[in-house]
Image: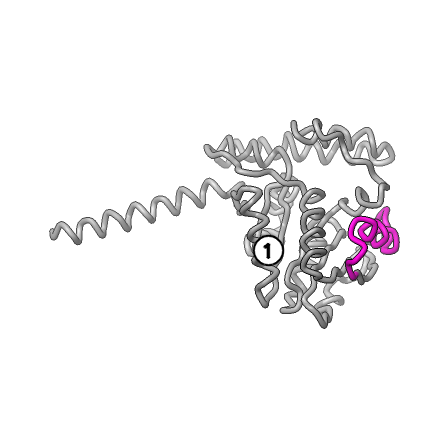
């Protein structure tokens, strides 16, 4: 065989194997996680805002991954998202278990603050989709954001999770817009996926992040967040939903670990 041809074949095989290995390392139980540094994440988000089409961001935690195991449409949305960011110490440990290091674990509550800052600088309006059954109203959330960035233009709607979310397909936007939705997973991801409007440059489900902004729920101290014990803080903060929260923690820690171990 010609030496040049042999080199090409070996090079292609090496690249193919590298891609397989890289995809495996960025995959947790079939859900893609983008292994990016903080700087790389912010750079991507800024790029999204200059593109003239729709982008969906998901902050993936172990509960998302578990839901994806039994909800295939949700799994499809996660794997087709433009950016999947690791949220939760469980994802970081999963990367370690699978043989690679996670560059950055970034909570949605922290990411939303950075996106608000970028929106303020670039003068991009916001659209808030508020859960009617949630703790924070549209008015409260809007006021909390404006206290941080008074110059932002903010509109939105309040909807019930009990309604058919597909009725809200293709919201109309006259200007390039950022959308935040707090319906909780998987509803917020389905709602966002219904949109895909070119004027909607960036959309992200934010779960309970609005409640942190309004002060309805207090975040864990920084040291607890850094060591991955924010879930423990939430158990004692939300006493009215204590058993529900304990069940969620059990799934995110115990069930998630068992599934990861047997599907490696």
Q: Give the residue at x 46% y 32%.
A: 99
Label 1 SS: helix
- The mark tally for this picture is 1
| Residue 166 falls within the magenta-colored stretch | no
Depth order, front residue of 54/238: 54
Q: Looking at the picture, does residue 248 appear above or below residue 114?
A: above
Q: Quadrant of residue 66?
A: top right
Left or right of 167 in this view: 49: left
* Res. 42 visible in picture: yes
In percent of width and height, residue 4 lies at: 16, 52
In percent of width and height, residue 81 lies at: 58, 55
Q: Bounds of the magenta span?
A: 133-153
Label 1 neighbourhood size at 10 Å, few (<14), some (14-19), many (20+)? some
Q: Give the residue at x 74% y 28%.
A: 232
Mark 1 = which residue? 46
| Residue 149 falls within the magenta-colored stretch | yes
Residue lying farthest to the left in this orientation: 1
In percent of width and height, residue 63 lies at: 66, 41
Image coloring type: one colour
Left or right of 51 in this view: 205: right
In percent of width and height, residue 85 lies at: 59, 45
């Amino acid at each position: 065989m010609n030496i040049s041809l042999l080199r090409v074949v070996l090079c292609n095989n090496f690249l193919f194997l590298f891609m397989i290995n890289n995809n495996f390392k960025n995959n947790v139980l079939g859900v893609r996680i983008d292994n990016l540094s903080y700087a790389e994440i912010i750079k991507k988000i800024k790029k999204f805002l200059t593109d003239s089409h729709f982008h969906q961001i998901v902050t993936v935690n172990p509960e998302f991954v578990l839901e994806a195991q039994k909800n295939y449409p949700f799994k499809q949305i996660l794997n087709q998202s433009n950016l999947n960011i690791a949220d939760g110490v469980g994802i970081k440990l999963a990367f370690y278990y699978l043989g690679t290091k996670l560059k950055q674990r970034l909570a949605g509550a922290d990411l939303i603050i950075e996106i608000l800052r970028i929106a303020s600088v670039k003068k991009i309006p916001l659209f808030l989709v508020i859960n009617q059954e949630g703790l924070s109203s549209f008015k409260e959330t809007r006021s909390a954001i404006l206290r941080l960035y008074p110059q932002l233009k903010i509109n939105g709607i309040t909807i019930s999770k009990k309604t058919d979310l597909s009725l809200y397909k293709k919201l109309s936007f006259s200007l390039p817009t950022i959308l935040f939705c707090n319906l909780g997973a998987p509803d917020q991801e389905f709602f966002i996926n219904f949109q895909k409007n070119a004027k909607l440059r960036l959309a992200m489900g934010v779960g309970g992040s609005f409640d942190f902004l309004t002060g309805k729920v207090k975040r864990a101290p920084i040291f607890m967040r850094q060591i991955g014990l924010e879930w423990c803080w939430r158990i004692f903060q939300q006493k009215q939903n204590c058993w529900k929260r304990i069940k969620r923690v059990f799934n995110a820690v115990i069930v998630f670990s068992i599934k990861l171990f047997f599907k490696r």
